[in-house]
């Protein structure tokens, strides 16, 4: 067997186990990583202990520069897309003379545009640079959010929700792709979890914020729900403008890195066998490579299972709680604890998945909590049991979202292919928000059996079923690679051609 074939076989697919690419401590493996020995090594001559200390300090520096601001951006994003649920129970439908069907249509329009624009946004992110692309879309959606507080009828709200989806489409897939270009596969889980925990915090914080802002009812002749949109939109615009200075570009261009640290970042990515350390020009072949890859669609199925449930939960939780007999303000406040619990578990699962390298089994375990929660909501009429069900529902949804995205990123190689794949996976998942927006119907209150049943089916069939299928399918693929049944893919190819095979090699 050739050394090239042996090296390529070592780059295993993540079947719920993160790949085990070589690290700089393993000199034998590092020598087989294409091009690593040709890169400048600023730490040549350092002992293994010194290398570990330098690497730990570098990662800590990256965390402080990248993670806090990105988490803030997603908190704002999720707050802006879901605060309509808080506005609804504060009188939005009555004041705009809308029916329940029209409200659901407004929710659906957001997901149509949001999902439709996501697959290509990572290409724009790569071409325009993160420090330009992300601030632009934030300012645009902040303006749109502010305008939602100025509408007078259904058509105005519907138009605003559509354009909010267009503007927000680039953030979530963009940031997950961006993080995958900075960190090793074994490091990204906890960081993506911290980033996504902002969604749960947004639900928690959003309930408190909405309850407070709604007290401005009558100020300036505006209803309380109007001020929810206006004030949160203006804050988004300000954060978007500041993001030009706080969002950094990719490793080869980031200005906060010294030349030495830039070399270290690129070396550690190369040692992780990632093509994100390479410079690629976009070609349509990358798009089609992603489109034809079965892993793209298997992860899309898993993601629709958790994302469809996510949006049903986040958009209608205040409504569900209000039907337990609470006032609008109390319902908003009672929506806080389930989200807070979900944020904690999301971060824990991110840490656990990185440490155990078992992303598939983490998804399985967490999804069982959600299945139990929605079973409680569907099968009980006791308010206390149903409120407990919202806790388990949140715990079973939020950790799976971040974990699934990291799992997909770890199994997709190549700068543009990974970006397109994450766009497909997240876009398809978010398209299911159209379903989520229409399953909690006014005529089904107070038990909302249809809504709970659909979410339960999503979690059992797509989240749990899709996870089990993908986990065992990737195990089978790994066995084929280790048995040499994929070696024919690299025969007769140059090193550059092998590199472009990405996760197929």
Image (cartoon, rainbow, N blue to C red):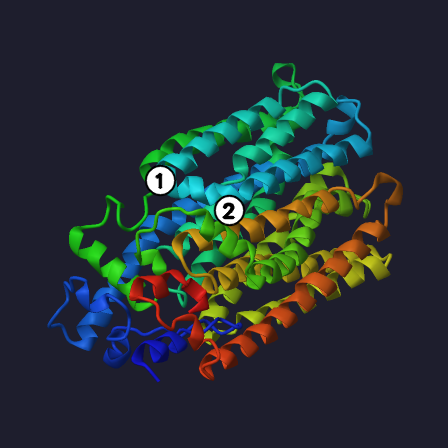
Q: Residues within 10 Å of mark 1 (few under 14, many from 20)?
A: some
Would you place residue 365 above or below residue 171 in this image?
below
Horizontal side of residue 368 vs 325, given as left or right: left
Q: Which residue occupies 63% across, 61% down?
A: 302
Residue 172: give its label.
2
The residue closer to the viewer here, 329 or 46, is 46
Quick one: which residue is furthest to the top in this view? 221
Residue 13: x %, y % from top left: 47, 71
Horizontal side of residue 252 vs 47, given as left or right: right
The residue closer to the viewer here, 451 or 287, is 287
Task: Report the mark closest to the observer, 1 or 2.
Answer: 1
Q: How many marks?
A: 2
Instruction: State the SS at label 2.
Output: helix
Quick one: which residue is furthest to the front in this view? 492
Residue 272: x %, y % from top left: 34, 67
In the rendered image, which residue does mark 1 sit on? 129
Residue 122: x %, y % from top left: 45, 45
Q: Which residue occupies 38% across, 60% down?
A: 500
Residue 59: x %, y % from top left: 30, 60
Q: Residues within 10 Å of mark 2 (few under 14, many from 20)?
A: many
Residue 147 seen anywhere in this rendered image of the structure: yes
Answer with the quarter of the image where residue 180 lies.
bottom left
Horizontal side of residue 457 vs 22, given as left or right: right
Would you place residue 218 above or below residue 460 in this image?
above
- For the residues marked 1 and 2, what is the alpha-carbon distance in whole angstroms? 15 Å
Answer with the quarter of the image where residue 223 lies.
top right
């Amino acid at each position: 067997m050739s050394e090239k074939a042996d090296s390529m076989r070592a780059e295993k697919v993540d079947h719920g186990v993160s790949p085990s690419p070589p690290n700089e401590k393993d000199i034998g493996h590092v020598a087989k990583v294409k091009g690593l020995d040709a890169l400048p090594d600023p730490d040549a001559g350092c002992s293994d202990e010194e290398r570990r200390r330098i690497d730990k300090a570098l990662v800590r520096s990256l965390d402080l520069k990248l993670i806090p601001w990105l988490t803030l951006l997603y908190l704002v994003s999720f707050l802006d897309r879901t605060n309509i649920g808080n506005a609804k129970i504060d009188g939005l439908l009555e004041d705009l003379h809308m029916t329940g069907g029209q409200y659901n249509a407004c929710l659906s329009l957001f997901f149509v545009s949001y999902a439709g624009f996501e697959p290509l946004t990572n290409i724009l992110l790569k071409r325009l640079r993160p420090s330009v692309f992300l601030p632009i879309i934030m300012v645009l959606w902040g303006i749109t959010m502010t305008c939602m507080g100025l509408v007078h009828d259904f058509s105005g709200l519907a138009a605003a929700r559509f354009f909010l989806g267009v503007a927000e489409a680039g953030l979530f897939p963009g940031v997950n792709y961006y993080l995958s270009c900075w960190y090793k596969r074994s490091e990204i889980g906890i960081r993506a979890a911290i980033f996504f925990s902002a969604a749960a915090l947004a639900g928690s914080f959003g309930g408190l914020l909405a309850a407070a802002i709604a007290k401005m009812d009558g100020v300036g002749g505006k209803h309380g729900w109007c001020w929810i949109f206006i004030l949160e939109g203006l804050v988004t615009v300000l954060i978007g403008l500041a993001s030009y200075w706080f969002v950094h570009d990719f490793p080869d261009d980031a200005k906060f890195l010294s030349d030495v640290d830039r070399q270290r970042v690129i070396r550690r990515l190369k040692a992780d066998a990632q093509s994100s350390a390479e410079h690629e020009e976009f070609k349509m072949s990358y798009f089609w490579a992603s489109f034809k890859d079965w892993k793209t669609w298997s992860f899309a199925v898993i993601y629709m299972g958790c994302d469809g449930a996510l949006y049903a939960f986040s958009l209608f939780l205040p409504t569900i709680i209000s039907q337990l007999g609470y006032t609008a303000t109390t319902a908003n406040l009672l929506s806080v604890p389930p989200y807070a619990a979900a944020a904690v578990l999301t971060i824990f699962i991110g840490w656990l998945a990185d440490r155990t390298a078992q992303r598939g089994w983490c998804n399985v375990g967490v999804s069982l909590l959600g299945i139990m929660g929605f079973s409680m909501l569907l099968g009980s009429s006791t308010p206390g049991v149903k409120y407990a069900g919202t806790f388990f529902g949140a715990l079973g949804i939020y950790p799976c979202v971040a974990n699934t995205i990291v799992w997909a990123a770890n199994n997709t190689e190549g700068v543009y292919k990974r970006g397109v794949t994450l766009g497909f996976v997240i876009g398809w998942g978010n398209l299911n928000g159209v379903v989520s927006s229409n399953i909690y119907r006014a005529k089904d209150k107070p038990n909302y059996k249809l809504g709970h049943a659909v979410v339960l089916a999503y979690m059992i069939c797509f989240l749990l079923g899709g996870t089990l299928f993908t986990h065992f399918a990737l195990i089978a693929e790994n066995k084929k690679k280790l048995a040499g049944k994929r070696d024919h893919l690299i025969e007769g190819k140059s090193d550059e051609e092998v590199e472009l095979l990405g996760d197929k090699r």
